[in-house]
Amino acid sequence: MFPAVSAGSATIEVIEPATERVLEQLPELGAEDVDAAVAKAKAAFPAWRAVAPAERAALLHRLADAVAERNGELATLEARNAGKPIGNARGEIGMVAECFRYYAGGVERLTGKTIPVAGGVDMTFREPMGVIGMITPWNFPLVIAAWKLAPALAAANTVVLKPAMLTPLTAIEFEKLALEAGLPEGVLNVVPGSGSVCGQRLVEHPDVAKIAFTGSTEVGRGIAEAAAATIKRVTLELGGKSANVVFADADVEKAARAAPYAVFDNSGQDCCARSRIMVEKPAVDEFLAALRDEVEGMKVGDPLDESTVMGPLISAGHREEVASFVPDDAPVAIRGSAPEGPGFWFPPTVLSPVSNDDRAAREEIFGPVAAVIPFEGEAEAVALANDTIYGLSGSVWTRDGAKALRMARAIDTGVLSINSNSSVRVSTPFGGFKQSGIGRELGPDAMEHYTEVKNVYYATEE
Ligand code: NAD
């Protein structure tokens, strides 16, 4: 099913986080494998950009259909490899198909402009960039790849995708599915290799026009530096430490019951996690009571069990990092349950009260640990929400519409929801302010970010 491992060659073991068993063994790839994939993508580019737009759109629709047909199989693989609840995995694979349909619809709408000038006609073209390198994280493996693949392919680029080595299996399957759906050989190339060797080579490769990266702020910073050597275009979708601001005039019970899913979703391994739960002081007791009820009732366990809402963490090493945010003297107010093991389990945990200066409020934990930060009034809410190096997502809960909109304008963040936890839709832009990233994915403009603007002037005077 997966690339064969030849005798004597180095291998990488892909682990199932819920059981700690080896799911798959893959050959360890090197810089030469990246070079070969880039060469294939470069060779495939002229023919791919020449495919008629309607035909390219039809191919992407066919790929979306193939993903939808194989949803069950891909979702099971994703659930096992990433340790995520099967229902969530099905939703993510559904979004992969939706994303390809959305950008298939954009292929024939990617237009330039005509601009009034003296002495001739001026027009712009949206040209594909060539080979796009994509580097993706382990938390939402295939769906985050799709956010990049669908607009890039729709805009007539070819691609080399390097998935995270903890969760490469659905990307490997997806490459096969794309070929079966009729995508020409070389248009999409998946290189399941390490970040330090294969990722680095992709960023440095002179024939790669752009890097679309999702991952940590630390690695993103290194990618921006390395990309500077070849003036490579980059989009960076990085970390977050988002605020969930609950005013006393909100439906406090509703906000509290929604809060766990805004931070413990995907075991808290979510860049959008609203892990700073800011509650206006008069509402703290009511909020914590409803939150306790919800967190203690969360079913944590086997990702393949339909009733599970939270699975394990991705690895033993990551569990250690998460645990470091809950030392013995931490103000643990609520702790849910988790299986004993095997598996990299960690119970959903709420710390309260926390100051916005504490480590648990400043650093991205990327695990099921939330900090409740009390505040007084709108001005303090804005100051605390913005007192972070990040700016990715966030929520505001209040029944006062004008206050909600004042808050929405005042918080420095790329994505904000009012009386809701929702962050991501295929049809709306997604990305971060400040150290949460550069650029936007999804929405109507994403295809343009995989093009260069060319301006052509045609002199018409005799
Ligand atoms: P990571 O930064 O460790 O790794 C991300 C990818 O970069 C992996 O494929 C990895 O192999 C690769 N990589 C590592 N070192 C590299 C190097 N030197 N050169 C090139 N590539 C390299 O992140 P992770 O642990 O996989 O994912 C978690 C992080 O991703 C969190 O910080 C999270 O907030 C962030 N994230 C952001 C978004 C978003 O859209 N903003 C979405 C999901 C995750």
Image (cartoon, grey):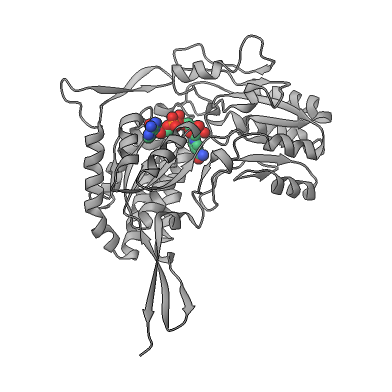
In the rendered image, residue 289, in percent from the top left (x then y), is placed at 75, 23
In the rendered image, residue 241, in percent from the top left (x then y), is placed at 60, 33
Q: Is residue 219 above or below residue 453?
A: above
Quadrant of image for the C terminus = bottom left
What residue occupies the far front of the structure in this picture?
A: 229
In the rendered image, residue 254, in percent from the top left (x then y), is placed at 72, 35
Q: Is residue 449 above or below residue 91?
A: below
Of 413 and 223, which appears nearest the observer?
223
What residue occupies the far right of the structure in this picture?
A: 282
Q: How many marks?
A: 0
What residue occupies the far left of the structure in this picture?
A: 7
Left or right: residue 428 versus residue 156 is right
Left or right: residue 103 versus residue 130 is right
Q: Looking at the rendering, which quadrant does residue 333 occupy?
A: top right
**Residue 78 shows in this picture:** no
Of 239 and 224, which appears nearest the observer?
224
Q: Looking at the rendering, which quadrant does residue 376 occupy?
A: top right
Left or right: residue 199 versus residue 250 is left
Q: Looking at the rendering, which quadrant does residue 224 occupy?
A: top left
In the rendered image, residue 12, in percent from the top left (x then y), is placed at 29, 23
Q: Residue at x 70, y 27 (%)?
A: 356
Q: Residue at x 50, y 34 (%)?
A: 217
What residue occupies the far top of the structure in this picture?
A: 328
Of 25 and 98, which appears nearest the observer?
25
Quadrant of image for the N terminus = top left
Of 404 and 30, which appears nearest the observer?
30
Ligand 1 visible in quadrant: top left
Q: Residue at x 68, y 18 (%)?
A: 334
Q: Residue at x 79, y 40 (%)?
A: 378
**Residue 446 shows in this picture:** yes
Q: Is residue 411 above or below residue 240?
A: below
